[in-house]
Image (cartoon, helix red, strand yellow):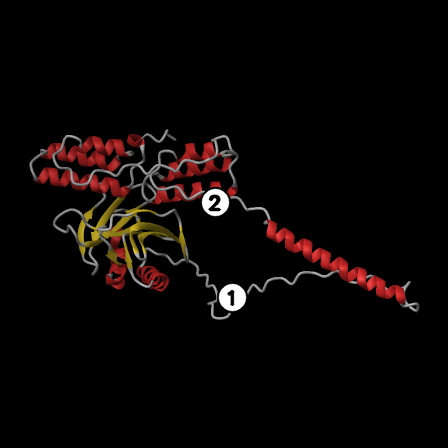
Amino acid sequence: MSTGVPGRTRARDIDRARTAGNLDAAYAEGQLSAAEYHDRIAAARVAKTLGELSDLVADLQQVADAPPAVVPAPRSEYPPSTRARTVDRRAAGELLDRAYGEGQLTEDEHRAATELLAEATTLGDLADITADLQGSRPTRVAPRPPASGRSGRYFAVLTAAALAVAFGAYMLAGRDTGSAASAPPPAAVAPVPEDPRPAPGEPEPLVFAPPNLVTGAGLAQFIAEYRERFGDTVADEVWLYDDHGDIERAVPGQPNRLVSYDYRGGFHQSDDLTTRPVDTPTVDLGALDTGAIGRVLTDAPAIARVPDGVVTHMSFDIETFPPHAGAPTVSVYVSNSFDESGWLMVGPAGEVLRVWPFEG
């Protein structure tokens, strides 16, 4: 893996698509000849890094949406030589899985990185394996704290009480001339365990197996659970894979704060709060026709002309390029085992707006 230099950062499918959009606009404006446009589109399709994509549009005027800058990993308070825990390796593995789903890694690269991950022993090893990948790193999970002083005092008082009871029983038994010698010692007093059930009025926790989210039925279930969890269907950005999802949305009542969630049959905050522009455009998942979009998902491999392809992931956001600028769109990504890929843009009602097919 590389050293994390921004120009060497891995490119995602969405980065390649945005660069292709820039090239489309430049060709339409006459900045590129047909031959130049063809060559650059071909290069964008196979580009591995943000630096390669940036070079393809560096000499163009008014590039509307250059590839995003790398999201650096937060600095750790531990030196690189610190031993890694299982939870650290698991977090790095999730980052690799996400990078593979976004097209930053090929199947072979993902497999090789995963094998290295199994052999990693230090935090520095994990950082090296994921250094050239885009995406925020999970917040470091703190080690399990030792028992508090309050807990220790509780057990000390409990032990003292038990000894007092035992001593009192012994004194009483000593006065009983008939059974003093044969009386068994009193049983130790054990603390009563906490009732694991929820308090009255609190709902029982529910655990669901995550559905296949890149199907119409899976999308409908996800939206229903999203509405139940947050009380609305509004988000800044949503990425759905077959078995998990990534969500970004404003903190309720704090439009200048962004919170990220990981969905795997339930919603869990996946990172610290960050700053959010208050005018960030949002999408309404409730406006999606899940039945119509489900039919598009079924036909997506044929529409994108990807042989034996499957839908790997999809995203929901606001389109930035004309003629659909400002409109909510669904981006559907298709790939196969040969790393051949294509994608399409779909409207909320399931209408196919644009296709970037695989051209083998």
Q: Tell me what residue is drawn at x 32 percent, y 30 percent.
A: 5
Camera-side residue: 72 or 112?
72
Identity, as a three-letter code, of the amino acid under mark 1: Pro
Identity, as a three-letter code, of the amino acid under mark 2: Val
Q: Tell me what residue is drawn at x 42 percent, y 38 percent.
A: 111
Quadrant hosting residue 73: top left
Which residue has dot 2 on it? 141
Q: Tell me what residue is drawn at x 8 percent, y 40 percent.
A: 28
Residue reaching furthest left? 30
Q: Tell me what residue is drawn at x 28 percent, y 30 percent.
A: 7
First reached walking from the N terminus: tag 2 or tag 1: 2
What x and y, as percent, mark residue 266?
Answer: 41, 58
> Helix, strand, or loop for circle 2?
loop
Which residue has dot 1 on it? 198
Camera-side residue: 199 or 287?
199
What x and y, as percent, mark residue 274?
Answer: 33, 46
